[in-house]
Image (tube, rainbow, N blue to C red):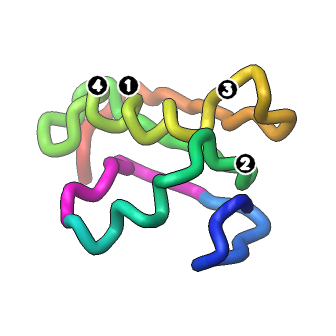
Amino acid sequence: SNSPLFNFNFAIFACGLLPHAEKFQILFEKLPLSTPSLHVIGEKDFVIQEEISLKLFGVFSSPKNDKNPKLIKHSGGHS
């Protein structure tokens, strides 16, 4: 990862979203994040809507990121 605050080998997000709290913004200063990631999104999720999860996916997605994130969509919702 390119953040000095954490050093993860990979990340898995189910119904993931970007935090809005100011104290977490330092984690997103250097984008895109290069940590390999898997993002799972429910197409019928009405709690964390698809567009919100795709914003998180976007901070990992870049032509410069050779560990491109993986995206899995399922037909279900939030459970």
Foreground: 77 or 20?
Answer: 20
Describe residue 41's horizontal placement relative to residue 8 as left or right: left
Badge 3 element: loop
Query: Which quarter of the figure has residue 49?
Result: top left
| Residue with the most extreme right position | 66
Q: Is residue 40 above or below residue 49?
A: below
The amino acid marked with disc number 2 is Ser
Q: Which mark's residue is nearer the viewer, 2 or 1?
A: 2
Outermost residue, left side: 46
Badge 3 amino acid: Ser
Q: Which residues are magenta?
A: 12-21
Q: Which residue is mark 3?
A: 62
Q: Of callouts 2 and 1, which one flags the residue occurring earlier in the amino acid sequence?
A: 2
72 displayed left or right of 78: right
Instruction: Kindly identify which numbered label has been placed on residue 51.
Output: 4
**C-alpha distance separating marks 2 and 1:** 28 Å
Disc on the earlier residue, 3 or 2: 2
Labels 4 & 2 near each other (Cβ < 8 A): no
Task: Tell me which numbered mark, 3 or 1, is placed earlier along the sequence.
Answer: 3
Q: Give the residue displayed 32% in from the left and 24% down from the top.
A: 43
Amino acid carrying label 1: it is: Ser
Q: Residue at x 45, y 29 (%)?
A: 74
| Mark in front: 3 vs 1 | 3
